Image: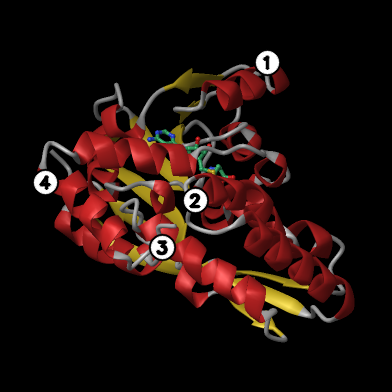
Amino acid sequence: MRKFGDKSTCIFHDLGKSIGGFVMLNEVAKERATLKESDIVDARTLKTSHKRLAEILQPGMTVLDVGCGTGAITSGITEMVGPNGRVIGIDNNLELIEKARQKYKNIPGLTFEIADVYNLPYHSEFDIVTSARVLQWLENPQTALHQMVKSTKHNGQVLVLDYNHTKISWEPEIPVTMQSFYDTFLQWRSSAGMDNEIADHLSKMFKEFELTNIKVTDQSEMTKRSDNDFQTYITILAGVASSKGKQMVNDGTITESQRVRAEGDFRKWIKECAKSQTMYLLAVEGTKKSD
Ligand SMILES: C[S@@+](CC[C@H](N)C(=O)[O-])C[C@H]1O[C@@H](n2cnc3c(N)ncnc32)[C@H](O)[C@@H]1O
């Protein structure tokens, strides 16, 4: 079995970077990033799940939502920019885009397109280009950010919302089986080139792309047992164990019994002990220089 930190994984990673292997690593990241269950994404709204964007949107704006999934947040953007605005949601997952088109059809000013963030077909077109929880899944977030900046109008804004997965916390501690699964999950992600701490690296990346007026807003997501939507959010990691966990079993990172045990112990912990979970999330915005 290959585990992160084992030579086999490290060699694979190095090969990916050297022998024309960007494509190879890209394929690994793409496979690992593929969203199999969209329930949690469907449950999001602009006002609850992309709060900083909701604060800066103005009627009449043009907005590009990169990695829009099934369009739950994107449709909220359309409501805020109103009939004189224009909103495009893009995603590289055909199934998700089809769901979005079906669910939000006939909304004037809103379109969904299949596109890859690594190759966006836009040039200085949008007042705001945003991505929420997308760069965390990419092996090359710099290229993605470059494409997002390219798509933004001069004096327009780029706004990225993303996690630092190493700073998640639970009250009380989660079972050791789930902690061990989670640690291995983060290693599995980073062995495909993903940055588990991307939230804390964004402002440096923004400076490198000469974005100005950089502002960082803490958007950490806390859920408490007394919240109505506690079950939706506290079960996120159980969902990771049942979806991404199966991919990890298939590629030999963990065994099925380790996966089942971690998920089972965690669900029991939710039922009997869980008080709260906090996912560390930052919104980072910057302005593209004028011409
Ligand atoms: C965790 S979901 C976030 C969805 C939504 N933005 C939200 O916050 O709920 C990440 C999304 O990024 C999309 N994605 C991943 N890699 C992508 C790429 N290279 N180009 C475009 N979309 C991508 C996935 O298909 C998925 O819909």
Residues at marks 4 and 2, CA–CA distance in whole angstroms? 28 Å
Please name whichever residue, 238 or 197, is drawn nearer the observer in this view of the structure.
Answer: 238
**Mark 2 and mark 1: Cα distance apart in space:** 24 Å
Q: Earlier in the sequence, mark 3 or mark 4?
A: 3
Contact between marks 4 and 1 (CB within 8 A): the answer is no
Q: Secondary structure at mark 4?
A: helix
**Callout 2 amino acid:** Arg
Mark 2 lies on residue: 133
Specify whether 233 is left or right of 12: right
Q: Which residue is mark 1?
A: 105
Q: Nearer the viewer, mark 3 or mark 4?
A: 3
- Furthest residue in direction top, as rendered: 106
Which labelled disc corresponds to residue 18?
A: 4
- The amino acid beneath tag 3 is Lys
**Mark 1 or mark 3, which is nearer the start of the sequence?**
3
According to the image, what is the colour scheme of the structure? Answer: secondary structure
Viewer-nearest residue: 264 or 252: 252
Identify residue type, mark 1: Lys
Q: Is residue 225 left or right of residue 18?
A: right
Q: Is tag 4's residue or tag 2's residue first in the polypeptide sequence?
A: 4
Between disc 2 and disc 3, the foreground one is 3
Q: Position of residue 167 (x, y in %)?
A: 49, 76
